[in-house]
Image (cartoon, rainbow, N blue to C red):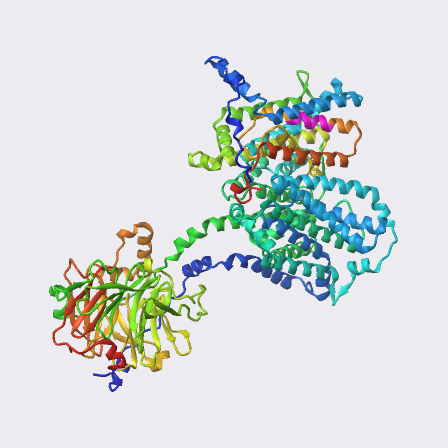
Amino acid sequence: MSLVEDSNFLSGQPKVQKQRAVLSFRRIVSDLLNRNWIEGAIPFITFFVLVTVILITTDGYFAPTNLKTLAQYSSDAAIVTIAMLLVVAIGGIDLSVGSTFALCAFVALYLFHIAELSIYLAFLLTILCGTLIGFVNGFLTGILGCGALLATLGTMITVRGIFVIASQAYLVEISSSARFDEAWEYIGYENFMGVPVSFWALVVVTIAIYLMFKYTRFGWHILAVGGNRKAARHAGIDLKRVILFSYMLGGTLVGLAGFLFAARQNSAGSDTGVGLEFFVLTGLVLGLGGFTPGRGSVFSTLLGFATIYILGNVLINAGFRGDFINGAMGLILITVLAIDMKYRKERHRILARAYLDPATMKVDPVQDMGKMALESGQTKLDGATLLGVGEVNGPEDVILDREGNLYCGTRDGRIMRLFAPDYKRVETFAKTGGRPLGLAFDQDENLIVCIAGMGLYKISGPDQIERLTSQTSRSWTSIEDDRQIRMADDLDIAPDGRIYFTDATKRYEMETWGLDLLEGRPNGRLLCYDPVRDTTKTVCDNMVFPNGVCVTHDGRHLLVASTWTCSILIFNLERMQDGPRYFARGLPGYPDNINRASDGGYWIALAGMRSPVIDLAMEDPGFRLRMAKTVPPTNWLFGNLNIGGVLKSDAKGKVIDAYWDKSDGPLYMITSMREHHGSLFLGGVTNNKIGRIDLENADKDWNGPDSYWSKGN
Amino acid sequence: MDAGLNESSNSFQSNGDLSQQNWGRGWFGSAVRSWSKRLSIKQHPLEYIVLGITLTITLVFAFLIEGFATLGNLAIVAQNSTALVILSCGMAVVIITRGLDLSQISVMVAVSSVFGLLLSNGSDYSIAMLAAVFLAVILGLLNGWLIAFIEIPALLSTLATAMLIAGVCRWGFLQGEFLVLIPKSLPIIEYISTGKMIGIPVSVVIGALVLIATSLLLNKTVLGRIVYAMGDNYIAARLTGLSVRMATVWVYVFSALTACIAGIIVSSASGTVDFRIVTNGTLLFEVIMVVVLGGIRLRGGRGGVINLIIGVLLISVLRNGMTLMNLSGQVQDLVKGLVLISAIVIDNYINPRDTETDTQGDL
């Protein structure tokens, strides 16, 4: 009866059509919304759109000389943006940056030209001036707890007042000063390694702040306070101090920017820094994709700033006036904020609406079962002995070892052992923490388990659990990161030790697998774990709910049940890349696990029965979508899970026997069965018992481990 | 971090003052109770402090500055502060809902420049006024829609609309200029700027009318009730089924309308629409100062027209005195900035914020 000799049989079987319709608009939308990087991608996308538009419309905008000029003129404002980021990250805002910037620039000019201090001292004092204003802001908002917006609005006009008064008194004198200093000129105009010095300052600041957010305690504290003030306080963070320091650090950076500006311009006017806070804020909001405290993405922020800066620059070059640019900034600010708010709010709703994505699926008509059909009224499972009643909760798969002990997984994550010969004694064999489904013994009598939500595990003894794999290689066409094995369902082990197992669906969990039927898409895959190399790879992707796995008796082929298509597929283990062929199709129910029978055939568990109505519904995705949206889940049209059975097929996939249960149980929704010494043990994923029937005409010496690994190892 | 504990605890305490005494059940009794509650010094310390400061400053100015304590100067003070009163009426209503309208001055300038342009192009004043009011309503609706329906925090959205409105207006209407000249010879302009109604300047009358309207809005209308409820506890107000979204929209429309009236009065009085009041922007701070110093807390839910009057008194006396002392505009700005900061600090001291319950954008 072996398939090896009969190689014509396999090539005679129809090939399974390659599954299409894996991608759909709905699916792309829901997958995109599911990704976290999509928010961070917004500044990149806008930046590249802008750059592309400029490349098309303007000649030579990105020429080295122009880039150098841009770098020289934008770096001080970019530093101010980082200062603003520090303050926004902590949950505040600093509207006084423009005034502080102007005042610091003035202080630098005054100290350099009028006080004639050394440039280093002038630099230090300028920065100190910025820190001092930062201290005032931090004191008002952090220590006293005033509203940041109004408090910094207050410092903004006060500092602006000081600046205007001071500059009126000294600017003429400053502009007529003839003091020349090489270091001053160097900072203002020179290049270091072909790049302006001020840009290097920006690079240093950027890296420093990046490292601060990433690695230092203070940076983490800032993000914690901005993210959730209450949680931060409960974690023992001194809120007032962190807020004060972040404003002070922000002020320091603004001071640095002011110094760079002073060195470059060598003057300051009454409009210096006016509107800078709005400009910087627009860049920041664009970069962060909204006004979000608790985020320290320095590079995104700078990208947002660069976008705004280049946009403004290009508009000015194109002859637009400052007022138009102001209006444009306001519009950008509103648009980004609006998108952010709406996205934040609607994301989950859209996701919930778009996630379920039914597709057309045509199921083969039910093959003629003749006298074996359910309608014939035979109930061979009636009168089965019930084992472990109430002690095993949801044994999806059952398996027996050489000694005849019975193992099964339960809903609460345990593997139970029922001791031979009467199976009255039940003990917990191991606790997995997931939902154990398929079981198999390997050559060394370790129990290999598929655990839904966790992956593939090996149990080598009581409570000795070891993870074999939980991830596979990523498929490149999928937007969703599908490395994680989501619902490891059933497995079997080839003679060479490779473990073939199914990931029934990549889109749903153990609790929601029913939605996968509603979707009717090829969401599952067949995986292979190689214990020698400890690698996992996807053997066949895009299968329709691949469920039971069974290596054929000859050890050279693999049977995989495709539940929703009501068919069994067969792979040639040596030529997996050829894809599957049909082994049996048009089954009367939804096949779950497949296991070897003693006579060279296979047992096929039917978890539920098809009905013409659900078959029709599978052909109409719109109908199923409407149903899912308008009808409560309890009233959904679904396969009949209240009655199940076991089919027996011969070695060539022809159904030769059927075992049906009574319509009122007790063994409904049968998901697995194992033959052992002339008995058949039956488990069901929603049952609380295991059934046992004695088979006539079966080989009383046959058992699973011997069949796989030959007698006595 | 115990800031939240003593918040609002004093406003419900019994104080053993007039409000506790039995003044009868009739309208008179209830009026006395309500007013004595409003005037209670224990419940409203800031108002009395500010009144005291105002009085002191007035006395000091009266002694120091020649020509301060004259009837003529009083008329000037009243006339100069009408715009401030009108603007702060709108701002107060917004702040009581726990919002803030940073775009008020931009709206004012945009509306009055449309008004001025239409007038100087020879349009009838009624058409110009209608257009101004129409534009104000549109801009108010824009603000309200962004805040109520798009749910952008009020601070950020009005900050952005301020930029947008000012930029578009200057670019579109003024072609980059910052001044619009208004023909002062027009009878309507003349009437608004110098006319008198039963011996009182028309602008002052308009200011008083706006004050009365605001008082009625806050105390006698459903919208007013919702405004207080929203400011006190927004979520509770929403859960009670009040139409908080539409209320927000109307509140910002009201604010824009006050900006419109103030804009027309200011531009008529000076004969120009000066765009620089947006960019140098101390007017906005003055408005916020009036509201905060008057004792309307920034956390919303409290305050009324009487608070505005208290705030305006201080600011206008300060402004007038400083001008009479020949202080330059920059020094005045400096002083105003310091006063604003101290007002915020005092407000924060009297009505502490619980920053831990702040939502995003509650800056």
Q: Residue at x 27, y 54 (%)?
A: A636
Which is nearer the eye, A625 or A554? A554
Specify whether residue A360 is in view.
no
Residue B211 placement (x, y as % from top left): 59, 24
> In which quadrant of the rendered view does residue A95 lie?
top right
Residue A319 placement (x, y as % from top left): 70, 53
Q: Quadrant of the C terminus of chain A?
A: bottom left
- The number of numbered discs placed on residues in the rendered structure image is 0
Residue B296 placement (x, y as % from top left): 58, 30
Q: Main secondary structure of the magenta part?
A: helix
Specify whether residue A346 is in view.
yes
> In which quadrant of the rendered view does residue A82 lie?
bottom right
Q: Quadrant of the N terminus of chain A?
A: bottom left
Q: Residue at x 22, y 74 (%)?
A: A403
What are the residue bounds of the magenta stretch? Answer: B311-319
> In which quadrant of the rendered view does residue A47 lie?
bottom right
Assess whether residue A482 is covered by the magenta stretch.
Answer: no
Give the answer, above or below, for where B125 lies relative to A385.
above
Give the answer, above or below, for where B170 lies relative to B16.
below
Which is nearer the eye, B132 or B230? B230
Which residue ends up furthest to the bottom in the rendered image?
A5
Quick check: A185 left or right of A145? right
Assess whether residue B316 is covered by the magenta stretch.
Answer: yes
Residue A520 placement (x, y as % from top left): 32, 63
Quick check: A274 left or right of A522? right
